[in-house]
Image: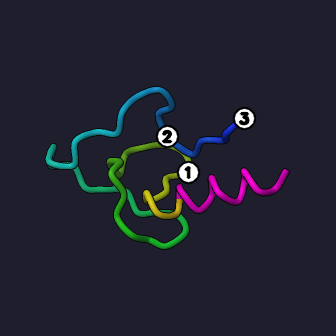
Amino acid sequence: MTQQTTDPAPGRPAPDPSEGEPRAECVLCREPTEYPASAKGVVLCPVCEWQEAQRAACSG
């Protein structure tokens, strides 16, 4: 089974939120994420990321 990822930096752990850089907003719910505001690509919060993974898994 292939899982799509929306992680802006695949293969790298999320940066530590205590680094001081502002957090990026989730593109779906606008909640803060664990990624810095400078992260490129689609950035999702953990809840929306999990929900997107569930939708992708059930879509066949």
Mark 2 surroundings within 10 Å by alpha-carbon count, few (fewer than 14), some (14 through 19), many (20 or more): some
Q: Reading the chain from its start, which is encountered first: label 1 or label 3?
A: 3
Q: Reading the chain from its start, which is encountered first: label 2 or label 3?
A: 3
Mark drawn on residue 2: 3
- Mark nearest the camera among 2 and 3 is 3
Q: Secondary structure at mark 1?
A: loop
- Give yes or no for contact between labels 2 and 1 (Cβ–Cβ under 8 Å): yes
Q: Which residues are magenta?
A: 49-60
In the image, what residue occupies the spot 57% across and 45% down? 6
What predominant SS class does the magenta segment belong to?
helix
Q: Residue furthest right?
A: 60
Mark 1 surroundings within 10 Å by alpha-carbon count, few (fewer than 14), some (14 through 19), many (20 or more): few
Q: Reading the chain from its start, which is encountered first: label 2 or label 1?
A: 2
Give, as a three-letter code, the residue at label 2.
Pro
Mark drawn on residue 8: 2
Reply yes or no: does residue 59 show up in magenta: yes
